Image (tube, grey):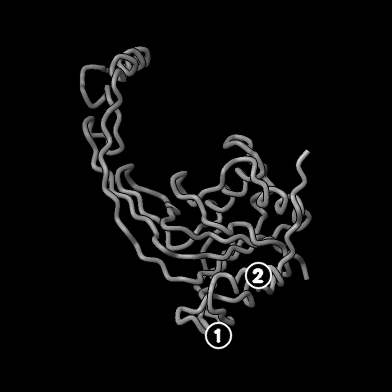
Amino acid sequence: MSDSIYIRLAGPLQSWAGAAVTGNIVRTEEVPSPRSLRGLLAGALGYRRDEVPEWLESVHFTVRQDRRATFVDDFHTINQRTGEEKFRRRLLLAQGMKAGSAKNLVFTPDAQGGTSIVNRTYLADTEFIVRITAEGRTEEIDRALRSPRFSTYMGRKAFPAVFPFYLGVGNSELIYQLPAISSHGDQGKARVTIHEFVQNHLMAPSVKEVPTVPDRQAWLKAVGRDLKRRKTVTA
């Protein structure tokens, strides 16, 4: 049975945006996608956007949702950049295009050339446990996630994960065995949702029962008993 790395994604807000038709309407997915998680992992490993190695495509993710999310809407405005018109005029002329239209001289997400109203949706007050499995790369990924090279965040830089983010290393079956925190403050069973991906496609979720603990302190103790946390050694 191979070992996997476990992380926890929890915080006031998360944004796992999928494909968008226009730049001023951005919807979050219900769960973190493999593409988003590979981006988080690449940043932790220290890779920049144009340096992501191909082996990350073979990393397998399983997402367990311990707490159901609430979707919230965010509206804000974006104005065209000051002084942008002169630069864009020169660029259009160099390309042999017309530069007389105001829409051609400014850029906003809705391509209307003025102030844009941007609508985004976020996930609020949810909690995910992510199992990361990569044959031959376990130690490298574990080292990166316990001491990331670049800051890790949940879809947007304004949305960092709360403590604890890095949980440790353990066998792959622990995704179905780690406890959840009881909503009633007692011990018993809770139902969690497991999301599996096949070739980057989200499959139908399954529901599993896991043991519960009364509070976060008891949860940390249980997770610390089941998962190994290696010490970070700095040069």
Q: Quadrant of residue 83?
A: top left
Q: Position of residue 178 (x, y in %)?
A: 63, 74
Toward the viewer: 15 or 168? 168
- Location of the N terminus (image quadrant): bottom right
- Mark 2: few/some/many CA within 10 Å (<14, 14-19, 20+): some
Q: Position of residue 26 (x, y in %)?
A: 35, 49
Is the residue 183 above or below the residue 159 in the image?
below
- Location of the C terminus (image quadrant): top right
Is the residue 84 above or below the residue 73 in the image?
above
Toward the viewer: 52 or 220? 220
Label 1 secondary element:
loop
Marks 2 and 1, the one that precedes in the sequence: 1
Q: Quadrant of residue 169?
A: bottom right
Residue type (three-letter) at the residue carrying disc 1: Gln
Label 2 secondary element:
helix
At 21% across and 21% down in the image, what residue appears?
Answer: 101
Which numbered disc covers residue 187? 1
Direction from residue 183 to residue 106 in the image, left or right? left
Residue type (three-letter) at the residue carrying disc 2: Val
Which numbered disc covers residue 40? none
Q: Position of residue 113 (x, y in %)?
A: 23, 30
At 30% across and 14% down in the image, what residue appears?
Answer: 86
- Distance CA(mark 2)–CA(mark 1): 15 Å
Is the residue 26 above or below the residue 193 in the image?
above
Toward the viewer: 228 or 80? 228
Direction from residue 18 to residue 163 in the image, left or right? right
At 27% across and 43% down in the image, what residue appears?
Answer: 76
- Mark 1: few/some/many CA within 10 Å (<14, 14-19, 20+): some
**Residue matched to label 2:** 223
Direction from residue 135 to residue 145 in the image, left or right? left
Q: Position of residue 218 (x, y in %)?
A: 60, 74
Residue farthest to the bottom?
A: 188
